[in-house]
Image (cartoon, grey):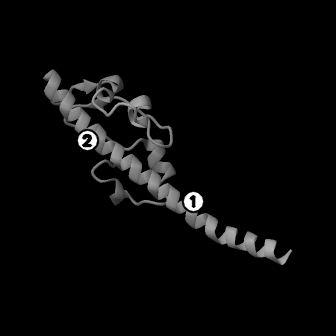
């Protein structure tokens, strides 16, 4: 009985730290996805001759990502929020829902240059 109590106490202590670390890892993945989208947009603009300010549909920038990845398959971040259509020569932004959900583990400076 005492052993079970000790294990439960250790789990209660460790769980918040684990959840925080998991959310930080998710935030880092979202930021990496934004870097990939930015590079895909640049390549798309070069290949198609699109000028600054031209809209780019999700399916168009997805085509410039590595096949077989989650981002290529869904166009969504790790939390399931869509990155959506983008614009040539504009930095992609973190989805608002993701920004709010991960706001308790990362500050505004973390998202630069992809902040809202």
Q: Is residue 15 above or below residue 99?
A: below
Horizontal side, residue 21 vs residue 113: left or right: right
What label sits on residue 4 in the rendered view?
A: none
Where, quadrant-wise, is the N terminus in this rendering?
bottom right
Vertically, is 101 above or below 106?
A: above
Residue 39 lies, in percent from the top left, at 23, 39
Q: Residue at x 16, y 22 (%)?
A: 48
Q: Quadrant of residue 107?
A: bottom left
Name the residue located 44 percent from the left edge and 30 percent from the top edge: 74
Mark 1 vs 2, N-terminal side = 1
Q: Mark 1 and mark 2: span between their CA atoms?
A: 29 Å
The quarter of the picture where residue 82 lies is top left
Taking the image as drawn, is residue 50 in sight? no
Foreground residue among 52 and 62 = 62
Circle 1 — which element? helix
Location of residue 94 by image quarter: top left
Residue closest to the eye, 2 or 101: 2
Q: Which label sits in the foreground, 1 or 2?
A: 1
In the rendered image, which residue does mark 2 sit on? Answer: 91
**Of all residues shown, which one is farthest toward the right?**
1
Point out residue 67 in the picture as x, y percentages from the top left corner: 35, 30
The spot of residue 91 in percent (x, y) is: 25, 41
Residue 113 locus on image (x, y percent): 27, 51
Which mark is on residue 19?
Answer: 1
Mark 1 Cα-neighbour bin, 10 Å: few <14, some 14–19, many ≥20: few
Tell me what residue is drawn at x 50 percent, y 43 percent.
Answer: 79
Q: Is residue 48 visible?
A: yes
Q: Callout 2: helix, strand or loop?
A: loop
């Amino acid at each position: 009985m005492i052993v079970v109590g000790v294990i439960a106490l250790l789990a209660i202590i460790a769980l918040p730290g684990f959840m925080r670390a998991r959310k930080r890892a998710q935030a880092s993945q979202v930021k990496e996805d934004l870097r990939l989208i930015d590079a895909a947009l640049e390549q798309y603009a070069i290949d198609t001759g699109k000028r600054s300010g031209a809209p780019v549909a999700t399916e168009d920038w997805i085509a410039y990502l590595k096949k077989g990845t989650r981002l290529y398959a869904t166009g969504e971040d790790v939390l399931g929020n869509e990155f959506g259509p983008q614009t040539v020569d504009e930095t992609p932004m973190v989805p608002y829902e993701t920004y709010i959900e991960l706001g308790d583990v990362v500050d505004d400076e973390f998202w630069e240059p992809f902040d809202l």
